[in-house]
Each structure stands twice: as structure tokens, then as C-alpha cells.
Amino acid sequence: MPDQSIPEARTSAELPQASPSSGLSRRALLGTAGATGLVLGAAGGAVGYAAAPASATPLTSVGSDRAMFHGKHQPGITEGLQACGHLVAFDLVAGAGRKQAAALLRRWSTTAERLMAGEPAPHDDTDVARDAGPSSLTITFGFGYSFFGRTGLEKQRPAALDPLPDFSSDHVDKARSDGDLWVQIGANDGLVAFHALRAIQKDAGSAARVRWQMNGFNRTPGATAHPMTARNLMGQLDGTRNPKPTDADFDQRIFVPASGEPAWMANGSYAVVRRIRMLLDDWEKLSVPAQEAVIGRRKSNGAPLSGGDETTPMDLEKTDAKGDYVVPLNAHSRITRPDKNGGAAMLRRPFSYHDGFDADGAPDAGLLFICWQADPLRGFVPVQRKLDRGDALSPFIRHEASGLFAVPGGAAKGEYVGQRLLEG
């Protein structure tokens, strides 16, 4: 879990409020049935009831906040962390090829555009999200290594999509890894997220079947007094030093350039997806100072052990009275620093997960790790290789599923995602 941060979604107090006269969709207004008020008569203590209609109530900022489907990049990459998420991979069915894949991406793009606008699905809407607004819904599509062989597009497969190397800490379940197609869904409302998941699954029809699916969550925007780096299930601030869209080299690190190869990946990115189980029973036996030594940062505020606050540069040379490094040599945050990995950087945008308990009572919980980069061989791979050689956090986590997906650039108005690949 590299030591980088992502800008947090704004709190509800910071977001623009919806106006009752702003032309909201049918989901943008909550239905009202009329309010009943209790009236106590002064004379003789008579009791009666008076009914008065309530005015339509606009959505709160959490419900009305909207991400745009069309754009230079696909949604779900640079937006703030959402409260609820679903990751799902599909395999094309036997006999389905390029033509069926193109029709499927066209259907998915139409559905995504409508749902992200807070509108019902184009057909057979389930009404699950009928009363909600967009709720920051994003739907993102990607292609796995195997997709290109199934569609006869091997010559268009990017070199950056070559399978990830094996790592010594991996305990990867192949059935819950990879896939022809990958969809990331995120929203700040659980029903909105599930509604999108169901619509995407139904749209797959006879062209593709679900290979695996995972559910995640984050803190709800507005739950803290001010925007802050998210905490993971270990209680640590998770994401300090993430690249920021305001960084001068952000696009260079995260997105394939417009002149990049292959041409259909212009303005796209590569997503590494890992299901990382946290061995919480073992972790929680450690004292707080011991946990901080593993990470290299204070648990309370994310400040480096060398001093300062969360944003203070880490002093890797600082020693204590005994001459030992204040930030241990095998501390997770020391190992993952971009300046210690040839500048390797990735944009982390994860979800936590909890899938129940094992027979011995150990929680099946951890992190749905998702990181974005222009080239995984320069982003994720060198950092993970270094972690593999001696990260203090390794005894407390287990990588149980893995995938790498090419995520093309955003669709222009009138286009569907992947059109330049499938019709090029």
C-alpha cells in the first residue's frame, strides 16, 4: 500500500446546494406525502390534528453531486474517494468476438451516461435508485490481456498490458483475478452504486458473464470535520504523498499521452487491481508504537516519525539517541517513496472491504487496492518488487487477487468507451 494520497471528496458543506428551481430530474426530488402536525387546544385541553402539505425538498449536496461521463479521461480516476464501490470483471462468452464486444461497450456507455446523470437505465430500470440523485456515481471500463485474443485484436494489445510478474508475497486466487473486461463503480450512496452494478450486469446479456465481483467502502464525504486523507482498516492514514492533479507532472505520470502507443489508448491509463487481505488479528496485537514503526508514520495524524505533520517531508537520515534511524529501514513509507524508486508513482484510489469471517473468527477484510499509472512497468511493478524484498508490513497483509487493465481515454459526445479500439 504505497505511501501516497488522493484529494478527498469535498464535504457536503463545501458542495453547491441544489435549488428547487434548478430543473432536477425525477430522481432529484424526494416524494412528499404531506406533514401532520399536532395541535393542542387551549380551551379544555382539546387535542386535534391539522394536516399541511410539505414543499418538495431538494436533494442534499451528497445526492446532487455529479461526475461527467464524457471527457478527456474516463470518470472514476481523479475524483475523490467515494463511500461505496463495486469492482466486477467479465469474460466474453464462447463465440462472442469483436462485434459483440463493440455492441456491449455501446450499451454500457449509454447506461453509464444516463445513470451518472441521475436518470433511469435506458431499459428495464429496477427503480432501486428511484429517489436518489447522481450521488457522485462513476462507472469506468477497462480491457484485460485476454480481451485482445478473444476479439482478434492482438496487434492492438499494449505492451504495458503484459501480465504482472509473480511476487513472493502473492497468494493469488486465479478465479478472482484478471478477466476480459473490468468495470469499476463508485458512488456516495449504496443503493445508487448497487443500481449501477445491476444495470451493467443486465446489459452484459448473452455477450459476457461475470468472472468475479468485489464490494468496497470508504468513509462517507462529510463525516469528518474537514477533508482528510482516508484511514484504512488498520486505522492508518492511507494515501499520503499521492500525486495530485495540480502537480506539474501529474498527467505525465498517470495518463498515456495523446501521442502515445497504441493510439487508441491516448489519454487513457492502466489500473492495477489487488485484493489485499489485512491480517487484523495479528496487526491489532501490536502496540501503537510498534504499528507506527511498521508504517513509519504516526497513527494519529499521519506525520512521519521524523517529525512535523502529515505533509512534512520525511527525514530519512534522522537518528535517535542510540544512533538508530527514527524511520526504520524496512518501514513501509520509507520503501515506497517515489524518490527511492526512480520516481515511480501511481495514483491510489482504493476501497476497503469486509467479506465476513473465517471459521476461526478471523475477519476476511482489507483493501481493494486500485492504482492508476501511465505505465505499470514504471509505476506499480518497481515499487512492489522493492516491497517484496523486505517491507515491515508484509507479515500483516496477503495479496489474494490481482488484475491489470488498460483503461482507454474518455468517450467524446456521441462515442462509446473503446470505440477507437473496436472500430479503428
Image: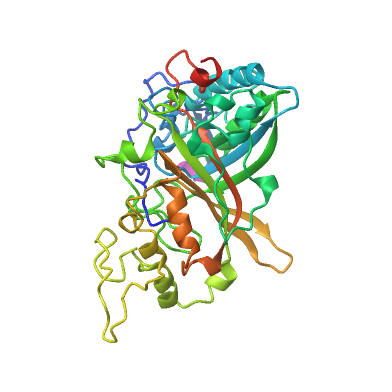
Q: Residue furthest toward the front?
A: 155
Name the side, left or right, on which 169 lies relative to 205: left
Q: Residue 324, image x and y in percent?
A: 31, 81
Look at the image and tell me whether residue 219 can be seen.
Answer: no
Name the side, left or right, on which 215 lies relative to 324: right
What's the residue at 38%, 57% (across, down)?
A: 3
Q: Is residue 41 magenta?
A: yes
Q: Residue 147, image x and y in percent?
A: 62, 30
Q: Residue 68, image x and y in percent?
A: 41, 26
What's the residue at 31%, 44% (across, down)?
A: 244
Please, is residue 377 above or below residue 185 in the view?
below
Which image quadrant for residue 9? top left
Q: Nearer the viewer, residue 251 or 22?
A: 251
Please, is residue 188 above or below residue 132 in the view?
below
Q: Residue 382, image x and y in percent?
A: 43, 53
Q: Give the magenta range.
A: 40-45
Q: How is the image coloured?
A: rainbow
Q: Is residue 153 magenta?
A: no
In the rendered picture of this protein, how many numbered marks are placed on residues? 0
Please, is residue 361 above or below residue 60 in the view?
below
Look at the image and tell me whether residue 340 can be seen.
Answer: yes
Name the side, left or right, on which 243 lies relative to 85: left
Which image quadrant for residue 215? top right
Q: Nearer the viewer, residue 139 or 424?
A: 424
Q: Nearer the viewer, residue 291 or 61?
A: 291
Q: Residue furthest toward the top?
A: 414
